Amino acid sequence: MDVAVPEVVTRRVHEQLARGDVGYPDFEAPDPLVAAFETRMAERHGWTPAGGGGRLFTDVIQAFQVLTDLLTEPGDGIALHVPAYPVFLESVHDTGRRVVPIPFGATADELVETWQRERVRLVVVVNPHNPLGRMLDADELRPVADAAAELDLVVLADEIHADLAFDGRRHVPFASLGTDVEDRTVTVTSASKAFNLAGLHCAVAHLGPARVREPLAALPFAYLGGVSTLSRAAAVAAWTEGDPWLAGLVEVLQRNRDTITAWAGEVGVGVVPAEATYLAWLDFAGTSVAADPAGAILERGRVRLSAGPDFTAHTPLDSSTYARLNFGTSPERLAQVLERISSTL
């Protein structure tokens, strides 16, 4: 996002540097970042993770790669909602696995049939969703959970945008659907999106399934690397002291979302108003840039959007008329962005 890091995060990192406290961490259990994660999930999102399942990763994608290696083989299917974050799609393809799209609104029976046929061995649920900005509720998540239970599959729940909910909505952690669901779910999140800390590479996972938790615990400590002392301090500060700043940010992002919705209606661009995140999934079908929206808008308007086809790569789905806009910026900058896009249509 085009916003400053929360002042409290900067202050806590500076304090740690001033103390010279940048050696190897040595904590009494639990790790303060795992504790901050567990408290945040309970107090903000209504889910109390079972103790002993916390583990740090550098980011969500590292956790995904670890699960891919642990639970699947080349040729296996990995199911996720498409369009999807391109790094997921490329990671599936590059490791010789296959993307199996999850249709929004599919029933549990439909998912079971498809997943059996496509030899799915891992399910990924990104909620809130990137790029659609959808917040899936319990009724939408339940068919995925039921299908995973019937086929005894692990679910990776990427909930990294959970703190960026609009219109008073409340995020539903996938693992909160029940103890049986938690026992097959790896929940991964981070302060990186909501607090603009992505470059610090610090994520937390709750490992519900013993088939994941036990093999990872048996690995040498250094095998997967770890997060830095300063990134841990930044994340703890964000989650324990950053909510006043976050509330102000969400207000700005929600206004930006409303601005984009109104603008899209005026210029003939399709959009479903985001329910969370700072991302807008724009459909330029019927405009003069429909053949290559991101390319044409960059060339003519000097605005860089994420190209739609990247979000359906390695699938039969077509998103060629789409592009993703990041609206994590000031209202003034967003107005300039939309004016430039309008000039290309």
Image: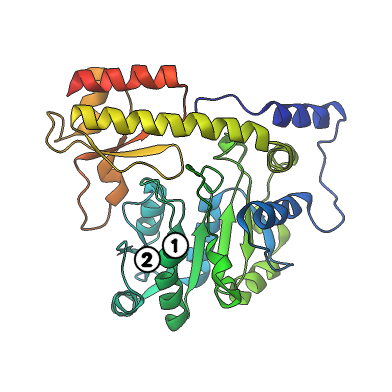
Reading the image, the residue beneath label 1 is 124
Q: What residue is shown at x 51% (from left), y 52% (from top)?
A: 61
- Label 2 Cα crowd, 10 Å radius (few <14 / some 14-19 / many 20+): many
Question: Residue 79 has which mark?
Answer: 2
Please name the colour scheme applied to the rendered image.
rainbow
Q: Quadrant of residue 118?
A: bottom left
- Mark 2 falls on what kind of element? strand
269 relative position to 16: left or right:
left
Distance from the alpha carbon under mark 2 to that under mark 1: 6 Å
**Which residue lies at the image location 37% right of the left edge and 65% below the top edge?**
79
Name the N-terminal-most of marks 2 and 1. Answer: 2
In the image, residue 312 lies at what x, y percent? 28, 51
Give the residue type at disc 2: Ala
At label 1, counting other C-alpha atoms closer than 10 Å, the crowd grade (few under 14, some 14-19, many 20 or more) is many
Q: Mark 2 and 1 residues: CB-CB less than 8 Å, in contact?
A: yes
Coordinates of residue 198 in the picture (x, y in percent): 56, 38
Q: Position of residue 319 (x, y in %)?
A: 22, 46
Q: Is residue 11 above or below residue 232?
A: above
In the image, farthest residue toward the front: 168
Residue 105 percent coordinates (x, y): 31, 65
Note whether 303 is above or below 80 in the view shown: above
Q: Quadrant of the C terminus?
A: top left
Work out whether residue 32 can be spotted: yes
Mark 1: which secondary structure? strand
> Of the numbered discs in the image, which one, if any, rests on residue 102?
none
